[in-house]
Amino acid sequence: MKKFLSGIARALCVMSVCVIAGCSYAGDGGSGSTPPVTPSGNGGLVGTPTNGQLQGAIAKETWMASNGNLMIENASGQKVEITKTSEVVVIPTGTVAKINMTQEDAKGDLFTDSRKVKLSSFVMSQYQVTRGLFKAVMGEEYFTNLGTQATANGTADENPVTQINWFEAIVFCNKLSRLCHLEPVYSYDFSTDGSGKMTDPEDWFKDTTNLSETVPTSDSSTNYANWKDKVVINLKANGYRLPTEAEWEFCARGGDPNEEDWGYTYSGSNTVTEVAWYEENSNYSGTNIVGCMDKANKLGLYDMSGNVWEWCDDYYNSNVTVDDTQYTDSEGYVKDPLVVFASSYRGLRGGSWEFNASYCECGYRKLNSSFSRFNYYGFRLVRSTN
C-alpha cells in the first residue's frame, strides 16, 4: 500500500501553482466548475492548466486512473480506484493585491479594511476527505471504531468521513505525509525543553507521560492533558495539514477580492441551495457524496458551504487579531496568521447537513473542543508549497 500511497501528495496537487495571495477583505466565494476558472484582476495571477496538460501529467503516473482518481493497492495486491480524491484546485497566484474596502463592504472578522492578510502559497483539496481515503490511510478497523457515519445519499466511500475530532484529523495528516515522503506538519513534544518533538503518530502513543493507545475523545481521557497543548504546527513543512481559518475563508470566498464572488454569502453563490447540503435539503438525514451540489465555487472547490463542518488549525478566539503582532511584516501585512493563543477550542468552518443556512455562510465561525466527535464533523486537506 505504501508504494502507491506515496503518490497521494502529488495526486492532490498535480499541476498546482501558488506563490502569494494577499488581500484586505470584502465578502464570499464564487461560482465555477471543473476545471477551475482563473480569477482576474489580482495582479499577475497564474492560470489553471489545460485539460490536455493535466491528462498528460496523469498519464505518466501509474498510481492514478485515467480520470485522475487514486489507484491504491489493497491487501490482495490489486489496484482499487478511490473516487473523489485526486481532483485538484489551483489556488490563485501572483503579487500582493492591496485592496481598499470600506468598512461597510466588510462582512467578517478575518479580512477587513484594517487587517491586511498575506498568505503564502498553498494548495487545497477540491473535496472534503472521503471515507475511502481515510480507510486507505488509517485502516478499516480504525474507521469502524469511529462510530456511525450518518449517510443520506451516494456511495458510502464517496461521502465525507465524520466522527473525526481535531486530534484524529492531524494524526491522519501526519500519516498521509509520511506515506507520501513529505515533511509532517504536526509534532508532539512531551519534553519541557523542546527536545522531545515527535512527528510519527505511532510514537505519539508511546510517550511515558501517561499516554493511552488512543487519541483523546474527552477531557477526562487520561492523555488529554498531554495532547491538549503539546502539539506544534509547522506551516513551513510541505506535508498535509488542516487549513488555517484565514486560508479556509480566503478559498471559500473564491480567492480574489476583486471579483463579485468574493461578496457572495455562501461559497459560490448567494443562493444556499445551489452550493450547500444543509438541513433543508438533507432533511437531517446525513451526509451526501462530496461534490453533491454539482456547483463549485470560483476556485473549483466543493462543499465549502455545507455537508460537514471542517476543522481548522487555529485555536478559536473571538478576537482573531489576538496573535497578529507576531505575524505582521514590515509592510503592515499579517502574514500567514494562525491563532496560537491557547484555549480549549479549535475552529470549524462551513456548516453541515444538520445545520441551517446561516451556519453555511463563508464568514461564520464555529468552535468546539479538540476532542469533540460528531457525525457532522470532517475535514479538508491543504499543503504548503512555498
Image (spheres, rainbow, N blue to C red):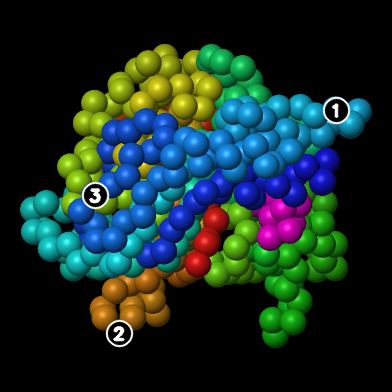
First in sequence: mark 3 vs mark 2? 3
Vertical arrangement, residue 326 with respect to residue 297, above or below: below
Mark 3 neighbour density, 10 Å: few (under 14) some (14–19) many (20 or more)? some
| Quarter of the rendering occupied by the N terminus | top right
- The residue segment tinted magenta is 173-182
Mark 1 neighbour density, 10 Å: few (under 14) some (14–19) many (20 or more)? few
Looking at the image, which residue is at 40% across and 22% down? 293
Q: CA distance from mark 1 to mark 3?
A: 44 Å
Q: CA distance from mark 3 to mark 2?
A: 27 Å
Q: Is residue 294 left or right of residue 75?
A: left
The disc label shown at residue 232, or none: none
Q: Amino acid at mark 2?
A: Ser
Please report contact status of discs 3 and 2: CB closer than 8 Å, yes or no: no
Magenta stretch: helix, strand or loop mostly = helix
In which quarter of the view is residue 193 placed?
bottom right
The disc label shown at residue 330, or none: 2
First in sequence: mark 1 vs mark 2? 1
The disc label shown at residue 78, or none: 1
* x and y, in percent, of residue 263 in the image: 19, 43
* x and y, in percent, of residue 80 in the image: 76, 27
Q: Amino acid at mark 1?
A: Gln
Vertical arrangement, residue 384 with respect to residue 129, above or below: below
Looking at the image, which residue is at 26% across and 78% down? 332
Please report contact status of discs 1 and 3: CB closer than 8 Å, yes or no: no
Q: Secondary structure at mark 1?
A: loop
In which quarter of the view is residue 330 placed?
bottom left
Q: Secondary structure at mark 3?
A: loop
Q: Which residue is mark 3?
A: 40
Q: Is residue 334 visible?
A: yes
Vertical arrangement, residue 329 with respect to residue 188, above or below: below
